[in-house]
Every structure is written in C-alpha cells, then in structure tokens.
Amino acid sequence: MNKGSILKKYLPWVWLIAGYIHDVVFILTSGRYMLDSDMASEMILSDLLNKEHSIITHSWIYSTEIRVAETQWFFRIGLLLSPDNWIVARAIGTAIMLALYIAAWLLLCKVLGWEKIGVWICAMLLWPFGFWYFMDITWGAYYVPHSIFMIVSLVILIVLAKKSADGNSIYNIKNALLCMLLLAIAIITGLNGIRNTLIFYAPLTVYAFAVLYFYLRDNGLKNALTDKKVKLVFARGSIIATAFNFVGYVGNHVFFENKYQYSSYNSMTWGSGTNSVTKTFKWFIDSFGYTDNATKELFSINGICTGVGLLICFVLVISVIRLAMNFKNMSEMDQLYAGIFFSMLVTIGLVFTYIYGEEQYWLTTVQFGVAAIFLEIKTDDKLKDFERKAAPTVLLIMAVLSSVGIVKANIETPMRANPGIEEVISFLEEEGYTQGCATFWHGPIITELTNGDIEMWTVTDEHDGMARWLQKSSHNTVPTGRYFVLYVDDEVSYLDEFEEYSGDKGELVYDDGTYTIFEYNN
C-alpha cells in the first residue's frame, strides 16, 4: 500500500478522532466557564434520579418533556464514576453519548453502502461547525439521545427491508429482536413527548406514504402489502413504527401528564410558527455555520471563520438542489436516504412555519444535511475525479475552521454563562452555605459548579414566588434555616418583593457590582 492510499484510508479517522478529543477536552477545560443553567439542570436531575434509583420521578418539575430517555441515562453514569467533580462527570456522560452517536452513524452508512464516505460524515459530525450544533450536540449534548434513537431506528428499518428484498426470511429470533428494539424505541420516544414524533416519525410517515402512493399509482392495490421491494418494506415498517410512537405519546398524555409535573406541547395551535417559509429555512441553512449569538468582527479570526461557515451553508444549498436533480439516477439506497431527507425538510419546515418551532429544533435534521452534502459528492456525475477526491478534505477543513470561530467567539462572549460567578462560588463555599435562591439562569449552575454541595431554589424573575420549572418539586417555598439569595445586576430592585414573599429580612453579605448576596434565616 503506497503513501497515498494510506493517507486516503486513515485521514478521515484522524479528523474524527481529533474532533472527538476536541469535544471532550473542551468540556474539561472550558466547561466551568461556559456552563448555563439549562445544562446544569440536566445534571441535577441525573443526581436526583441516581439517589432515588428511578427512571422518572415525582420529585422534579420537568420542562417541556418528561425525559424518560434523554441525557440523564448518560450523565448518571458520569456521576457514578465522578461524584465529586460534576464537570468531569459531564465529560464522561457526553463522551459516551458522542461515541454512541458516531457508532450509530457508522452503522447507518454501512447499511446504506456508504463505506467510503461514512467516516468522512462522522468526522464532520464531531466538529461544532454551527452555533446550535455546538450548544446542543458537541457541548450541551441535549439532542444527542434524540439523534441516536433516530439513526438506530433507520438502521433497523433498512436492515429488515434489505433482508426481505433479498428473499431472506425475516421471521427468526435475530430479526424479532430487531423489531422489538425498533418498536421499543418508538414507544420510549413517544413517552418522552411529541418532539420525536414531529421531527422524525412524521417525516418518516410522509416519506412512507409517498412511496406507497407512487407504487399504487403504477401497480394498484394487488401486492402493496406483500411486495418485498426495499422501499416498500421500509415504508410499511415506518408506518408501523410511527403507530407505536403514537401509542407512546398517548401513554405520555394518559399516564404521565396528570401524575408528573411538566409543560407539554399539547396546547400548540395553528399560526404559532414563523409564518415565513423563508425564515424557517434560513434557520436551517444558517445552522451550518453562519448563525451565532456571539459578536464577531468581520476581519477578526472569528469573523473570517464565520465566512467559512457561510460557505458551508452555500455548499448545503447547492447539494440539496443537485440531489433533487440527480434523484432518478441514484441507487435505491441513495434514493431512500435522499427521500427521507427531503421529507424531513418539507415536513419539519411546514411544522415550524405554521405550527411551532425554534431555530435549534432543526438540529436533528442538520446531521442529515451533513450526510446529504457527502452523498452529493458521491453521486454527482458532474464532478471530476480529482474534485470528488478533494471535496471531503476541503469540506472538513471548512468545518474545522468554522468550529474554531464558533468555539473561540463563544468562549469570549458566552450566551447564557455567568462571567465572574467563580468568585461568588468561592465566597459561598468559604462561608459554608448549603442552600440558596436565585432566578433560573443564575441558580442551577451554582449547584453543578459546587458538585451538588449547594442546593439552589429557583425563584421567579420578579422574586415573588418559586418558579415551577426545572427544580425539585419540594421547592415550593423558601429554604428552612440559613440560606442566601443571589441577585444579579438590577435584580436587586426586587429585594422588597422577595422579602414580602418570604417574610424574612436579609443582611447584605456580598456585593461586587454585578452579583449581590443577602443572607436570610428562616
């Protein structure tokens, strides 16, 4: 094997391993300073579930989902291995999630017959090339479990469809176990809430009905339920999986909604979305490297890297157009993937436009967009041989440069972090506080950064009561005994409101111009 062949074989693995190491090292080195309370709440819940030895709990006020199967499964492992350092615990949990995420994608690429581009796809997926991809995949990891369930479901559906099409019997123990896993994932994600239904099962069903429609149009009803073509078997399996997902969602509504404390999406109405197709799809396109909450000067390193991210956005748009143009010339497996991806774009785009959506909700589709770019490189007959060989490397370099800009800018100006909070925490630990109150974006991070030693109660923004959001359900009034209240910036103007609510009078014990702390004794 010559040097060129060795480089071609191992280069994508180098990119992949480098991306994985980057993500884990970032958490260990910058995690404390980038942490926000949304992320910290996940760790606090994980710690609570470990202590209760439960999967879900009545002792927690959830947000918009009951979290039957989300990041807690992995952060709990981290906390068991590192109970005295929650940042290390977070790094362990995230490392496990990212490893499973990439393993799932490698499996999907294998069953699609994408061995040559699969490692390239996975390598790019480990670099935080976009702002929300950084916040909720490689750093915050919130959408990683959702993504794993989606990819594993696709792998199972494709494996069963290919076996059926090859004339192999699918009625054996191995395939029965695969079916059980597929349906179990569908039910579990349904029990979580409606999120996976809208971002995965709805597009999957739309694609399935499109396949069935074109089959019926050409062949009629005669063999629609028995024909063993890959796409037809996949379509029938998708509809069955969606039905089980709906069963899970009904279970969420019937068994959980009145017994556990969380806000569901059942109150969604028509007209609550963007009401702009342009805005909806701009969200998706910008997610590949342009959007960022951090300020970037045009000719700074961060600004130049943002320009590279914008180029990735252009590459995505061109890739989608070219895939649509070349669709009929693709192999069956490539058509299957492209069809699912197009269905996601249309279905999710319509949901976000006319019902409800936020920019970061595109994240689970962004990963499919990354694979779509590499699929276009693989299938586009207009590309010369040297272009096809060079394109993956060029794309990875662009992704790494965009990642540099995203990470560097957000370390300098983090979106939801609390600069200077370390000095506050040092003061609290020195004074021996074990319980306190703060508004949501300033409270839970104190619990994580003190490794659970200081328990925080979340008060409303006006400090006139307890917030019913991401905290223990026992936090329905102020702590008993000695506690503190943290006021940030002009929140101190609500001092009277808090003292009227609590009935306690506080003593000023800390003030650095940003953070003000009053001590109380209930």
Image (spheres, helix red, strand yellow):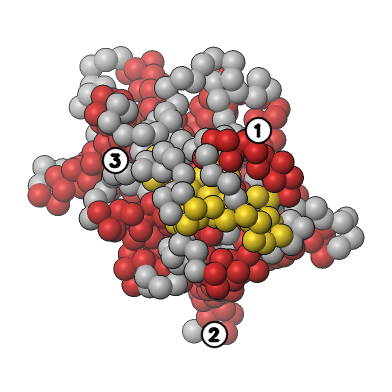
Residue type at numbered disc 3: His
Q: Position of residue 451 (x, y in %)?
A: 45, 67
- Residue identifier under label 2: 2
Q: Is residue 162 above or below residue 348?
A: below
Which residue is painted at 23% across and 55% down in the image?
Answer: 53
Q: Position of residue 264 (x, y in %)?
A: 42, 28
The secondary element bearing badge 2 is classed as loop
* 3D distance between C-alphas at marks 1 and 2: 45 Å
Is residue 205 left or right of 222 when viewed as pictured?
right
* 3D distance between C-alphas at marks 2 and 3: 62 Å
- Residue identifier under label 3: 58
The residue lying furthest to the right in this view is 299
**Which quadrant holds residue 385?**
bottom right
Residue type at numbered disc 1: Phe
Closer to viewer: mark 1 or mark 2: 1
Instruction: Name the residue nearer the viewer: 173 or 298.
Output: 298
